[in-house]
Amino acid sequence: MSGWLESMKNRRSVRCYKPDPVPQELLDQIMEAGLYAASARGQQNTIMIQVSDRELRDEIVRRNCAIGGWEEGFDPFYGAPAMVIVLAKKDWPNRVYDGSLVMGNLMLAAHELGLSSCWIHRAKEEFETEWGKQLLQSLGIVGDYEGIGHCALGYAAGEIPEAAPRKEGRIFYKK
């Protein structure tokens, strides 16, 4: 079996991270993989925000926790020291699909580089708030963007989960 398929089969979502920082060189490679995700009509209407600053990371955790309805102190990012937030132009009809392809590339690239990842939701709600809009503005991002997802990144603390057995009856043929 080729390496890329094996990589896809072995990548798992991880929900417990070491506090060790992720080297910028690895984050850059992961984001570069995101730039090469397929996009509808080749429009490339997605953007990424890397967050490794502890203060901003913790603020996003607090806001994400509040949106999710969890008690203060819970970390919906499972201690991951870095994240890449994927957003897409709000008026682009394929924004969710394009952003999902970017997220997939980010997670596969992280796995290939020896890192773990997990897709964390609620980016849409975060960037609908004034806080989210101001964050985009502070980064010089112009236009209306919708949050698609956060890719939590870091080194797994503990064992990588095994793949669940694949469900039968999900492939059909018409020859």
Image (spheres, helix red, strand yellow):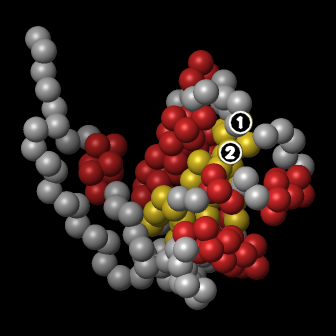
The image quarter containing residue 82 is: bottom right
Front-most of residues 138 and 20: 138
- What type is the residue that disc 1 sits on? Lys
| Nearer to us in this view, 153 or 55 | 55
Q: Residue at x 43, y 55 (%)?
A: 112
- Residue 126: which quarter of the image? bottom right
Position of residue 82 relative to residue 40, above or below, is below
Q: What residue do we see at 47% from left, 63% from top?
A: 117
Where residue 29 sits in the image (x, y, percent)? 60, 52
Label whose residue precedes the other's in the sequence (1 or 2): 1
- In the rendered view of the protein, which quadrant contains the N terminus? top left
Residue furthest to the front in view is: 69
Is residue 104 positioned above or below 165 on the image?
above
Can you give x and y, in whole percent of width and height, for residue 106 in the image? 52, 51
Vertical arrangement, residue 165 with respect to residue 88, above or below = below
Q: Is residue 95 left or right of residue 13?
A: right
Corner quadrant of residue 47? top right
Q: Secondary structure at mark 2?
A: strand
Distance of label 1 from label 2 (alpha carbons): 6 Å
Query: Which of the numbered marks, if any, corresponds to residue 146?
Result: 2
Residue for badge 1? 89
Q: Residue furthest bottom?
A: 73
